[in-house]
Amino acid sequence: DTSSWQLVVGANVLWTDILDSSGCANSGSALIPSASDDGGQVAAIGPCVTLQGESTLYASVQHRGYGEFFLRLLFYSAADCSAGSLDTPIAGELQNPDAWDLLTMVTPVPPEAHAVYFLLAAGDSLPHGLSVDDAMLTEQFPIFLDGFDGNGGGETSPCRWGS
């Protein structure tokens, strides 16, 4: 769900029944509508994650919307993300409002980093919403992309969610 995500810019963060990136009717995705007074800017930040000595992080997220989309990792020297702002690697790409795209990032962890925030942001000249799904932050690149909740892995019975 979206309860642990904080809104940075936009109207709110909603869990919706909009079809998710794998097309599962009962799974859903997060929607961040932009507020009319901030144009098309939207951003949400995930919970602070305490690091356990990882040397590299893999981040990915499915997204769909208008304008340009950004995935950013905000490293901190404090274990609760309260102080010591460090590197902020960023990856970005243009969005498609009619199709889900996967944006990934593999980045080294600064040696003095003890925590990280996962930031998702998008910008456009008009007030549009941003849909996101399958946000992942992990130490290793996923080995098995088996289409857990959809048919992206070639399953014959996709969508494991109940009706």
Image (cartoon, helix red, strand yellow):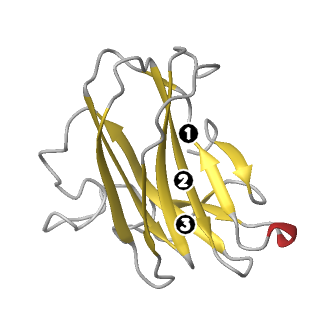
First reached walking from the N terminus: tag 3 or tag 2:
2
Specify the label residue 120 is tagged with.
2
Quadrant, the N terminus: top right
For badge 3, the amino acid type reads Ser
Residue 113: quarter of image: top left
> What is the C-alpha distance between the residues marked 1 and 3?
15 Å
Image marks 1 and 2: residues in contact by CB distance under 8 Å: yes
Is any atom of residue 28 visible in this view? no
What residue sits 67% from the left and 61% below the top?
Answer: 42
Specify the label residue 46 is tagged with.
1
> What is the C-alpha distance between the residues marked 3 and 2?
10 Å
For badge 2, the amino acid type reads Leu
Specify the label residue 99 is tagged with.
none
Relative placement, left or right, of 139 versus 114 is left
According to the picture, the residue beneath numbered tag 3 turns out to be: 131
First reached walking from the N terminus: tag 1 or tag 2:
1
- Disc 2 is placed on an element classified as strand
- Disc 1 is placed on an element classified as loop
Image marks 1 and 3: residues in contact by CB distance under 8 Å: no
Name the spot of residue 64 as percent of width and height, x first.
48, 72
